[in-house]
Image: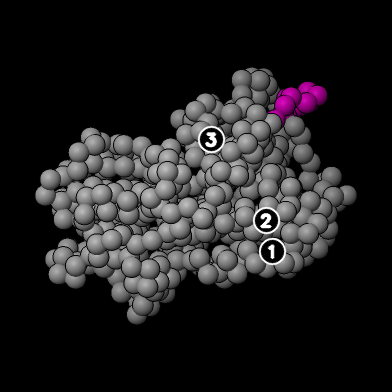
Amino acid sequence: MHDLESEFARGEIAARTRALTGPRPAARGAFVLYWMQATQRFEENWALRAAVLRADELSLPLLVYQGLDPTYPHASDRVHAFILEGARELDARAGALGLAYRFSLRRRRADDRRVVDRLAARAALVVTDDYPTAGVAERTARFAARAPCPVLAVDAVGVVPASRFPRAEYAARTIRPKVLAALDLALAPVRDRPPRRAMPDALLRSLELDALDLARADLGAELARCEIDHEVGRLALRGGLAPARARLRDFVRHGLAGYGERRREPTDDLGSSRLSPWLHFGMIAPAEVVRATRASAAFLDEMVVWRELALNLCVRTPRFRTMHALPDWARRTLAAHDADRREASYSLAELERAATGDALWNAAQMELRRTGVIHNAVRQLWGKSLLRWTQRPAEALRRLIHLNDRWAIDGRDPNSYANILWCLGKFDRPFAERAVWGTVRPMMLERAKGKFDVAGYIARHLP
């Protein structure tokens, strides 16, 4: 077990940190601010670790601040509730961990949106999360441009620091040996601790925070007051570390054995980890998941290799939401078949309502709408079908991103964009040429019947 001050921990923090502004702390800063955005946990949080060390070096207290507002793309009851539930758990545990944590909820777009700016005006330094999707990188860059003190962005997303892969990787086979070679070191445990100086109550009271009383708040009532998409409703899943760990325990005990085969059956509730919602919001450390599941080579490949590949895609590819992210061969072949006749045509509204002529696709879309996820065995079929039903591949890509980002609880995630782009040829190879597909790998819904219990899956999601 390494201490936070160890050479290993400091080296890992350095590998994960980008300075977005000048290095000198504000001379009259009263505290160090950790602005929690994408990594919504206290445990194994490299950004929080960096903030603790910097606060100690400056002999200052640390404030952990998290905010939620209605301006992010596809803001909804679904996402808001999950974040609020996680924040309630953080609030309940912060004191026992020696951390000063505050959360604010901006309900309307017209409400005050400068809370972080006011906190930064009194801070010596701001540490925040380095995250390439969900608007975090853009929001952080805008803030850093106007911040009165230094701003550091720290990567706590991957098991291995994203900086270890300075170029865009072509495929899983190119990143796999690099990730696996670094894995033992990356999984080395570090003992977390609170900052040495506590946040004075008087200083906390003096801050213009308007913090939400998470312990007493009626989350349903709070959601109703927010200017967000209320059609995308709350899920049975609950945000936070405790439910994430409960799901991980169940998967390890009952689902990890035989994972290589069981993951192909979407009606097997423990055949997949289904941890992506908590991983997306950073509520559980990916290293914790890997340590618990390392016995399964098949799961390790998905959890580490493909997840790190997806992160690398979004970090190293500026236009990762567009056709420009595809390899040249895929763009060329799709363009050559752009005008090919499609077998059916559906509007975005019909797709969103699961009103196509194919029951399996409709079941997948309804699983997404009702549960916030699509099982991996069905997701590829769901995505590739839009090439057959949308005249322009670029429009198919836009529709997939819209459907995923609006309804998926883990939408706007690097994994989401990697999965969607794979449907159009990313991280894949050319196949025999055919109409519509060109040389992109074809997948037909009709062929799923020999691979899993299609009838059972449809009955479950289209009752």
Kindly identify the amino acid type of the residue bearing the numbered disc 3: Asn
**Residue 232 percent across, percent down from the top left:** 50, 61
Residue 293 — which label? 2
**SS category of the residue bearing label 2:** helix
Of the numbered discs in the image, which one, if any, rests on residue 312? 3
Q: Amino acid at mark 1?
A: Phe
Instruction: Please name the colour scheme applied to the rendered image.
Output: one colour
Range shown magenta: 425-440
Q: Earlier in the sequence, mark 1 or mark 3?
A: 1
**In which quadrant of the rendered view does residue 407 lie?**
bottom right
Q: Position of residue 349 (x, y in %)?
A: 56, 50
Residue positioned 85% across, 50% down in the render: 451
**Disc 2 residue crowd, few under 14, some 14–19, many 20+, Cα 10 Å:** many
Instruction: Say which quadrant the C terminus sits in.
Output: bottom right
214 with respect to 258 (left or right): left
Asked whether residue 254 is in view, the answer is: yes
Q: Is residue 265 magenta?
A: no
Up the image or down, 188 lies above or below 270; here it is above
Assess disc 3: are there few (<14), some (14-19) or many (≥20) residues with their C-alpha within 10 Å of its C-alpha.
Answer: many
Residue contact at pointers 1 and 2, CB within 8 angstroms: yes
Q: Position of residue 448 (x, y in %)?
A: 82, 48
